[in-house]
Image: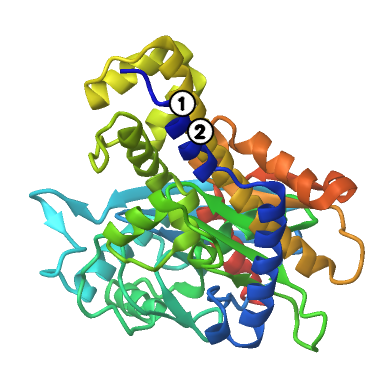
Amino acid sequence: MPFSKELFADIKKEFTVDSEQLHEIAADFRYDLRMGLKDPDLSSLRMLKSYVGLPTGKETGEYLALDFGGTNLRVLRIKLMGQGKFEILKKVAKPLKVEGVYDYIGAESTAEEMFDFIAALVDEAIDGDHEKKYLLGHTFSFPSEQSNLYDAKLIIWTKEFATPGVEGKVVNDLLKEALHRQGIDNVEPTAVINDTVAVLLAAAYKQPDTYIGSIYATGHNTCYLEPYAESADAPMIINMESGGFMKLIPNRFDKEFDAASEKPGEQRLEKMVSGRYMGELFGMALAELLGEKGKAYGFTSIDMSAIISEADKVAEIVKAKTGHDLTADDCAKVQELAGALVIRSARLVTATFVGIIWQLAGSDKVQKQHIAIDGSVYEKMPLAKENIMRALSELLGEDAAAIDTVLENGGSGLGAAIAAAMSQN
């Protein structure tokens, strides 16, 4: 049974953001940003202070970087040489959980065990040298409450973490205690940053005029350097937790998906743009076209990428996931539908970037700058990059020529080392 043309047109329209809506979203994002600076309770953006500005590019020395963003831990020893140059001298990586062997993220483990495991990894990164002094920067990608560059208290574990005794504690204190227990008193944790902040620090170290950093991958978040032009405060990177932006009009698929999600009514922007959810929304729309509304097929963003870029594979992918044979005409429509979801995602993300660009410009002209983006959707998803550039032109007109986007995919480690270097200023 070929797809209904009317239903296809209707579904595609649901995933279309026109120029007027795009301008509205950018303006609403800037408004939410400004309200959040006054009082985070007035905004859907959390506007978390990072307590760090941008690097000068002159940071030098040897530093340790702990990248703690999920179950795979990494500790790097990095030499910063200034002018954007750096060298990774040593890299140690281990999972916090190995099925049937050990598990430091489950409810049966303890904070002490978890941080002793991390301290042992640090020891490996410095080759057991307990003499040379090292400052350690820590990319910690969990919801935290921060009162300075050192003090980040874990608010609540996310992902599959359930280790007791960490929530409500300053993570650097727990790390310091574990290092001391193992006689590693020459390593001093000095900075904690979020992974999005790390992306901006790493990119700005290599390239001046970079004021916005974003992760556009499985999840989505953006940070930027707030100039505090209207106050005497020093410029500081603000982690917006922008995936939680709520001033968007979800379509019927978004609403249905949100209602069935783990946290209904939260992370609206992230649920509409990130790689984690794109495949599911696509599957919901396709189920309606196939007359199987409500059926879940388990499409992923990787499937969508293949559907968009390889026309000859569409029938095969859809058959494997849904059991349906499609005509060539319907395969073309499936490709168009996948493209529509990616284009919507790129346009919504760009609208938030432009809200920030307007904030940075104030009443002045938009200045030349780079937007640093890390993540698989930006790097690998067909149609994403070019539609970011198109939406920038649509929103900024001739000013769009001053903006470009750059890929920053090693940010978590390098950004943490730079934060450690900057902690001494």
Q: Residue furthest left?
A: 100
Compare residues 239 and 113 and report the one nearer the observer.
239
SS type, badge 2: helix
Quadrant assignment for the N terminus? top left
Q: CA distance from mark 2 to mark 1?
A: 6 Å
Please tell me whether mark 1 sits on a helix, a strand or a loop. helix
Labels 2 & 1 near each other (Cβ < 8 A): yes
| Closer to us: 98 or 132 | 98
What percent of the width, then of the height, locates residue 3?
A: 38, 23
Q: Residue at x 43, y 55 (%)?
A: 271
Q: Residues within 10 Å of mark 1 (few under 14, many from 20)?
A: few
How many numbered discs, if any? 2
Identify which residue is drawn at 80% across, 56% down.
209
**Dot 2: few (<14), some (14–19), or many (≥20) neighbours within 10 Å?**
few
Q: Nearer the viewer, residue 62 or 129?
A: 62
For residue 5, the mark is 1
Looking at the rendering, in which quadrant would you find the C terminus?
Answer: bottom right
Apparent side of residue 370 relative to residue 384 in the rendered image (left or right)? right
Q: How is the image coloured?
A: rainbow
Q: Is 77 located above or below residue 232 in the figure?
A: above
The residue where tag 2 is placed is 9
Residue at horizontal 77 percent and vertical 51 percent from the top = 395
Q: Is residue 65 above or below residue 1?
A: below
